[in-house]
Amino acid sequence: MIELRSNYPKALNDKQICYDMITFLSKQNLNTIEKGYYGAYLVISANHTWNPIDKLNTFKKGKIELENAIKQDSKNVELRFLRLSIQANVPKILNYDQNIKSDLIFIKEHKDKIQSNQLLKMVNEIIIKAENSN
């Protein structure tokens, strides 16, 4: 989990890290949180794709993976953080922003349950970003 979390913010600007994480996760028997990261990394990888059709298909696949993980464990703060971090950053034209407010509220109410300092730091950063973009 430490590697998944530490590479998550790096993946946006580092294509190799993003693809390495996707490759690693695709070869594992994933738990629900790892499935969420797999979906989130797929969404991020769409930024590293130049073909518009591939870009959209990769985004959709990642979105489905992330949403399926959240359906399996909707009370998981880390999964809701992943979705918020994606929805707060994707272009509005993709129409994937409907959970920003509810995820933000949920995360703020439950962030005291986060035991990882690394995750808590990322959560606090996305809270600030999401609040400032509204």
Image: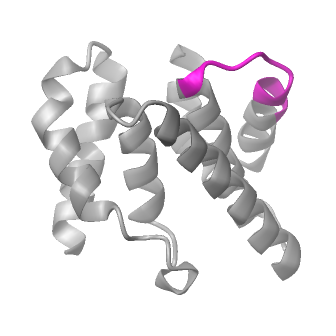
Q: Quadrant of residue 46?
A: bottom right
Image spot of residue 66 (x, y percent): 58, 45
Residue 100 in sight here: yes
* Magenta extent: 23-32
Q: Is residue 92 above or below residue 110?
A: below
On-image quarter of the C terminus: bottom left
Image spot of residue 64 (x, y percent): 65, 53
Along the line of sight, the residue nearer the viewer: 107 or 125: 107
* Residue at the image position 17 percent from the left and 63 percent from the top: 131
Q: On the picture, is 97 further left or further right than 47?
A: left
Image spot of residue 7 (x, y percent): 58, 32
Q: On the picture, is 42 further left or further right than 132?
A: right
Q: On the picture, is 72 further left or further right than 55?
A: left
On-image quarter of the N terminus: top right
Residue that protrudes farthest toward the bottom in the picture: 93
* Residue at the image position 59 percent from the left and 19 percent from the top: 3
* Residue at the image position 14 percent from the left and 41 percent from the top: 108
Q: How is the image coloured?
A: one colour
Residue 51 in sight here: no
Residue that protrudes farthest toward the front in the picture: 72
Q: On the picture, is 13 further left or further right than 105?
A: right
For residue 24: magenta? yes
Image spot of residue 34 (x, y percent): 61, 25
Q: Is residue 95 above or below residue 19?
A: below
Q: Quadrant of residue 29?
A: top right
* Residue at the image position 43 percent from the left and 36 percent from the top: 79
Q: How many marks?
A: 0
For residue 80: magenta? no
